[in-house]
Each structure stands twice: as structure tokens, then as C-alpha cells.
Image (cartoon, helix red, strand yellow):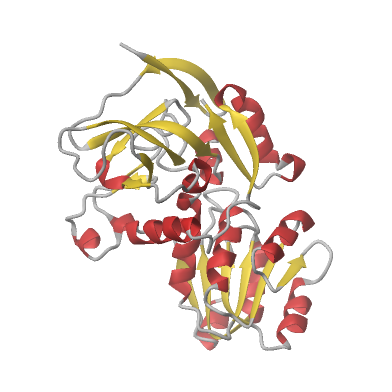
């Protein structure tokens, strides 16, 4: 049996690069030779044993692209040799939620690395329903960004932003920066991005933000008042942070304001205090977003291909699979201004 290199997560903070058998696709599966795979914050939830669905051993890596190596007998929409990317999960397509397009609510949803192995390996086997052909001459790295970009789009879709509204994205990580780009397409009056690192905030300005707030240097509430002329925030996106974000939402969201919770908190079991009176009085909406639909993934992929959503300023570091320890250290500790770290040599 032919072998491949794969980064196997054996337990909490226990990863090793091993030789494992190359998986063979079932009739409704596709084997992809990986060309690019990016590190995500969710990977660290798995590495730290924080995620409720994690079980070991597993191979992480759900943001990826490559070439189709082999297809199962039932696969018709893509062929060997095609350049491809995939959702980080699969869905049945026939349950009640899938019929409504709510794929992340699928009764049989399976996701990397909780139900099947991911792409920090030379090859990855995925359900055919999850696989998309890469359009045009789009790079493998750009195609791998469709997954995190789709998360950003999913958050923006939930907010139903109207032109001329004031928008605040908290947390200029990869998904926050993608969310800001999608928000800019909705023609807000002020598009504010807040965070703690000037280099990331500068990237936000490069990608369409009108204003930034470094919460370590200024009072966020006062800055919101200054930027919006006291009008406040209509739609606010939690893409990182702690209790201070929830407090700011209570203070600065407008009447009928929307608070969209996208990010996984630092600890999965984190709890935040919210005053019911504050959001009852303003009739605010608090909405959680978990993942993205297949339609949002396709939209993100096409918009990146057309240059409407940019990945270049977000992808900051590249490593080989053999150098995985340095890659994960760089991503976790945000070394050298790291935003998105990609493994592109296998």
C-alpha cells in the first residue's frame, strides 16, 4: 500500500508528521493531491482539546486546494487532473435543513477533522458533494482562502446591512478582514475595524475599511462616537475579543442594531455577560454564525477569482509540511506580523 506524509494529531498538543496509507475514495468521494493548506484558529481548538467534537487521532486542515488525483465511480461533476478546492464539511442534501439551503444545520453534517481527516497531508479524501472546480487560472493559495472568506461572507449575510449604515468589525484576523471586505460591498457609511495590532489595522484600511480603532491606545466607545458623529453602530461583528466587545455592543449599537457572533472565543466554554434590558430596549438582535452554506462558499470563490475580494495582504507566511512546527508556532504567536499561514510544499 502506498504511503504519504500526514500531520497526525494524536492528543492535546501532540502532533507528529507520520507516514500513513494514502486513502482510497469510495464511490461518492474524491482524492485530492494537496497543493495549499492554511492554518486556522479552529485548528488550535482541536490541538488544545477545546472543541466539543474532537477525538484523536485525526489529521487537521480544512482550508485547502489541490488537484484531483482520483474520483469514485459515482462522481460526475469533476474529473482526474482538475484543479479543486472543497468545503470544510459535507452535507446530505436531502434533509429538511439542506432542502432550505441551511447546510451547516444538516442532520448528517460531517466536518474536518472531527469526522474525517483533513489536508495537512500529501493527499486528502473528501465527499464529492463538497468539492468545487477552481475557476480560471486562480492560484491554489487563493482557492484555499475560499473557506475562511466564506465564513466572513456568512457573517455579513446574517446582518442584512443597508447602504449608509455604520459597521464595526471587531478582530482583524483573517475572517475579520474577509468580513470587512464583504461589508464594504454593501456600501456602509463608516466601516470600522478594531483590534490591538497596528499592522493588522493597516491591512484593514488597505482592504476597504474607512476607519480603525486600536483599543490599546484609545477608548473604543469614544472613538466610535467620534467616527460616527454620535450615531453609533448599526451592525457589529464579533471576530475576536472578550467581555469588552459585548459591553461595547450594549453601549453603541443603535436601535434595531445587529450583533453577529462569528468567532470562537479564546475558550470554548467562555461565558459573556449581557444585559437583557439593553437589547430589549433597543430591540437589538444577537445572532450566532457557525460556518457557511455551499452557496456562500461558491460566491466567495468566484469573488476572489474576480479580484473583488483580496487575499494577498492576508496571506503573510508560507512553509513546507516538513516545517510544520515553525508554521504552527508562527500562526499561534502571530510572529513577524503573521495573519494567515499557508503550507504550500508537500
- 62 left or right of 188? left
Residue at point 78% right, 78% down?
Answer: 222
Residue at point 68% right, 36% down?
Answer: 330
Quadrant of the image containing the N terminus = top left
- Numbered-mark total: 0
**One can see residue 50 in this view:** no
Please identify the quarter of the rendering in which residue 158 is found.
bottom left
> Which x, y percent locates residue 204?
68, 62
- 152 left or right of 2? right
In the image, farthest residue toward the front: 137
Q: Along the line of sight, which residue is nearer the eye, 82 or 276?
A: 82
In the image, farthest residue toward the top: 1
Q: Along the line of sight, which residue is nearer the eye, 62 or 267?
A: 62
In the image, farthest residue toward the right: 217
Please identify the quarter of the rendering in which residue 84 is found.
top left
- When the figure is inspected, residue 220 is found, relative to residue 139, above or below; the finding is below
Q: Along the line of sight, which residue is nearer the eye, 219 or 140?
A: 140
> Which x, y percent locates residue 283?
49, 85
> Which x, y percent locates residue 62?
44, 41
> Which x, y percent locates residue 296?
39, 61
- When the figure is inspected, residue 97 is found, relative to residue 226, above or below; the finding is above
**One can see residue 25 in this view:** yes
- 214 left or right of 33? right
Amino acid at each position: 500500500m502506498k504511503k504519504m506524509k500526514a500531520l497526525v494529531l494524536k492528543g492535546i498538543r501532540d502532533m507528529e508528521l507520520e507516514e500513513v496509507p494514502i486513502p482510497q475514495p469510495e464511490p461518492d468521494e474524491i482524492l485530492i493531491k494537496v497543493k495549499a493548506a492554511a492554518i486556522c484558529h479552529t485548528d488550535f481548538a482541536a490541538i488544545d482539546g477545546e472543541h466539543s467534537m474532537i477525538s484523536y487521532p485525526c489529521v487537521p486542515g480544512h482550508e485547502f486546494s489541490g488537484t484531483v488525483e482520483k474520483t469514485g465511480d459515482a462522481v460526475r461533476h469533476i474529473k482526474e487532473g482538475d484543479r479543486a478546492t472543497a468545503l470544510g464539511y459535507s452535507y446530505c442534501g436531502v434533509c429538511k435543513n439542506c432542502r432550505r439551503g441551511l447546510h451547516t444545520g444538516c442532520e448528517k453534517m460531517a466536518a474536518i477533522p472531527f469526522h474525517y481527516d483533513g489536508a495537512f497531508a500529501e493527499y486528502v479524501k473528501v465527499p464529492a458533494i463538497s468539492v468545487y472546480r477552481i475557476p480560471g487560472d486562480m492560484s491554489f493559495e487563493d482557492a484555499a482562502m475560499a473557506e475562511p472568506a466564506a465564513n466572513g461572507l456568512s457573517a455579513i449575510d446574517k446582518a442584512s446591512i443597508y447602504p449608509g449604515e455604520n459597521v464595526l468589525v471587531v478582530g482583524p484576523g483573517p475572517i475579520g478582514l474577509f468580513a470587512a471586505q464583504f461589508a464594504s460591498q454593501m456600501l456602509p457609511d463608516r466601516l470600522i475595524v478594531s483590534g490591538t495590532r497596528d499592522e493588522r489595522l493597516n491591512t484593514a484600511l488597505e482592504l476597504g475599511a474607512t476607519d480603525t480603532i486600536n483599543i490599546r491606545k484609545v477608548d473604543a466607545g469614544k472613538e466610535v462616537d467620534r467616527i460616527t458623529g454620535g450615531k453609533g453602530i448599526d451592525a457589529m461583528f464579533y471576530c475576536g475579543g472578550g467581555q469588552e466587545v459585548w459591553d461595547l455592543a450594549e453601549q453603541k449599537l443603535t436601535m434595531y442594531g445587529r450583533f453577529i457572533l462569528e468567532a470562537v472565543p479564546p475558550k470554548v466554554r467562555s461565558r459573556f455577560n449581557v444585559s437583557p434590558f439593553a437589547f430589549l430596549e433597543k430591540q437589538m438582535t444577537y445572532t450566532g454564525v457557525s460556518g457557511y452554506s455551499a452557496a456562500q462558499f461558491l460566491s466567495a470563490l468566484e469573488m476572489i477569482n474576480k479580484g473583488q475580494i483580496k487575499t494577498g495582504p492576508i496571506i503573510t507566511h508560507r512553509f513546507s509540511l516538513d516545517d510544520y512546527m515553525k508554521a504552527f508556532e508562527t500562526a499561534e504567536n502571530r510572529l513577524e506580523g503573521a495573519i494567515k499561514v499557508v503550507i504550500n510544499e508537500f
